[in-house]
Image: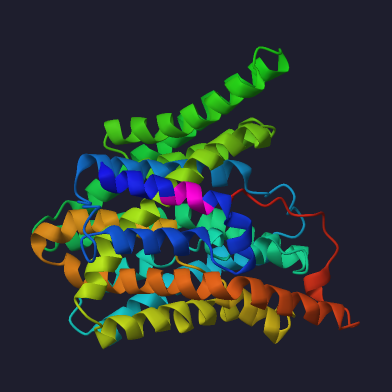
């Protein structure tokens, strides 16, 4: 436990100087990945982490489940009524294209991977995480419409990508040996969907009724939210359903059933998820980044990471935004800020656990690790200066722009201290 004591000390130290670090564009993921890398087996070896152990899997999976539920239950869909076209374009057009382009790039650049493995890599690296570039969605110089778009996209795309990861991972694991993989994957997703709908609806209606009759307190409402998130995930896993799909769908239904009146209560779940995400970033640094760096730089993996963070993300965004009349700088800004974050880390952990015995995990983990690591650094360090520069471009321009369409202020989910 000595290594984790050191990690806890770093958590406290970061919390004390968080504002100072934010001003220097040093984000929490940058700090935590660095801590994990230095303390892990690749370097000081005081924090041995085995990602296949039950405790590590439980921490990582519950963290993603909490964040999926919290994001889905509080994403500002109602605030975006009448202005939902841009997020829908990114999710309905840009996201599938990102997976497809990511798969094609992996098959071409990496060479030895099958189409199923390439598709799995593309899906793992498709979701975005606004927490890695938090200055972008909290900087009031950036037009509200653009901040809201990135906020909604980040809140929903990890849940939407989950079925793709599930199916592609099932194909890679089963190969040609199991002709029932498609039925098994579909059944797992269906059970997760059904459990998510049931748990989210019942819990939402019950807590809304209890709240209206003044049966609840502020503290008990916090307990209801986090309990519902865990219940949806745990029930799905117990009955061989997809826990992430269940948590995401339960969050959507719960938010609708409560008419999104539990924003304050959900902040507790977001705080727990935030703290847990710090642990996951440390695990990522110790288990993956350190060993990958120790094994040397392989040009194909790094090249794919660069392509994934640029062409694979930015071209689908540009295609999906055709017809919006956004300026070229806006399209580039939205395209660049597609950080690969916590969801990609957890999906990588799951893929490693499922594929390690087949000898297929090595290259996949190397590629996803380099992509996530470069994203943590590039998006974290560039978020504040680029957001300031982009915001100033509107102040200096008197021309009407669709980016400045008057809308209500966006609510930003708490993904940082």
Res 239 quadrant in image: top left
**Is residue 182 visible to the viewer in this orientation of the structure?**
yes
Look at the image and give the residue range highlighted in magenta: 10-14
Of residues 353 and 85, the one nearer the viewer is 353
- Which residue lies at the image location 47% right of the left edge and 34% below the top edge? 229
Residue occupying the point 33% across, 58% down: 36
Q: Position of residue 270 (x, y in %)?
A: 55, 42
Q: Is residue 65 magenta?
A: no
**Residue at horizontal 32 percent and vertical 69 percent from the top:** 369
Q: Quadrant of the N terminus?
A: top left
Residue 255 in picture, x, y percent from top left? 61, 37
The reply to whether residue 64 is visible in this rendering is no
Instruction: Please say whether residue 12 is one of the residues in the magenta stretch.
Output: yes
Left or right of residue 127: residue 296: left
Q: Is residue 367 left or right of residue 86?
A: left
* Residue at 69 percent of width and 79 percent of height: 330
Q: Is residue 204 above or below residue 312?
A: above
On the rendered structure, is 305 left or right of 255? left
> In which quarter of the view is residue 320 placed?
bottom right
382 lies above or below 411: below
């Amino acid at each position: 436990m000595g290594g984790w004591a050191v990690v806890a000390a770093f958590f406290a130290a970061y919390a004390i100087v968080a504002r100072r670090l934010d001003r220097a564009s040093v984000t929490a993921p940058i700090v935590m990945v660095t801590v994990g890398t230095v303390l892990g087996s690749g370097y000081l070896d005081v924090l041995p982490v085995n990602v296949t152990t039950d405790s590590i899997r439980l921490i990582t999976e519950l963290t993603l489940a909490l964040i999926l539920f919290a994001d889905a239950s509080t994403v500002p869909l109602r605030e975006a009524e009448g202005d939902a076209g841009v997020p829908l374009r990114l999710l309905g057009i840009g996201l599938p294209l990102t997976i497809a382009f990511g798969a094609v790039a992996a098959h071409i650049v990496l060479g030895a991977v099958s189409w199923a493995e390439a598709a799995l890599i593309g899906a793992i690296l498709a979701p975005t995480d606004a927490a890695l570039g938090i200055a972008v969605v909290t900087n009031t110089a950036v037009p509200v419409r653009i901040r809201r778009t990135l906020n909604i996209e980040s809140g929903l795309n990890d849940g939407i990508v989950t079925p793709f990861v599930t199916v592609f991972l099932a194909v890679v694991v089963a190969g040609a040996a199991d002709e029932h993989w498609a039925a098994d994957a579909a059944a797992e997703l269906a059970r997760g969907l059904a459990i998510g709908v049931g748990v989210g609806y019942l819990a939402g209606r019950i807590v809304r009724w209890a709240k209206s009759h003044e049966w609840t307190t502020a503290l008990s409402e916090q307990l209801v939210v986090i309990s519902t998130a865990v219940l949806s995930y745990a029930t799905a896993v117990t009955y061989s359903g997809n826990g992430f799909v269940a948590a995401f769908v339960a969050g959507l239904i719960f938010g609708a059933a409560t008419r999104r009146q539990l924003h304050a209560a959900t902040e507790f779940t977001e705080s727990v998820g935030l703290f847990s995400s710090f642990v996951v970033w440390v695990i990522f640094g110790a288990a993956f980044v350190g060993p990958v760096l120790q094994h040397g730089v392989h040009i194909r993996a790094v090249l794919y990471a660069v392509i994934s963070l640029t062409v694979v993300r930015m071209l689908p965004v540009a295609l999906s935004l055709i017809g919006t009349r956004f300026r070229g700088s806006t399209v580039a800004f939205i395209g660049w800020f597609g950080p690969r974050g916590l969801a990609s880390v957890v999906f990588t952990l799951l893929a490693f656990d499922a594929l390690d015995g087949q000898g297929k995990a090595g290259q996949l983990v190397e590629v996803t690790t380099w992509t996530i690591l470069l994203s943590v650094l590039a998006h974290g360090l560039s978020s504040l200066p680029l957001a300031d520069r982009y915001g100033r471009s509107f102040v200096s321009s008197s021309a009407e722009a669709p980016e400045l369409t008057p809308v209500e202020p966006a609510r930003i989910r708490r993904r940082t201290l």
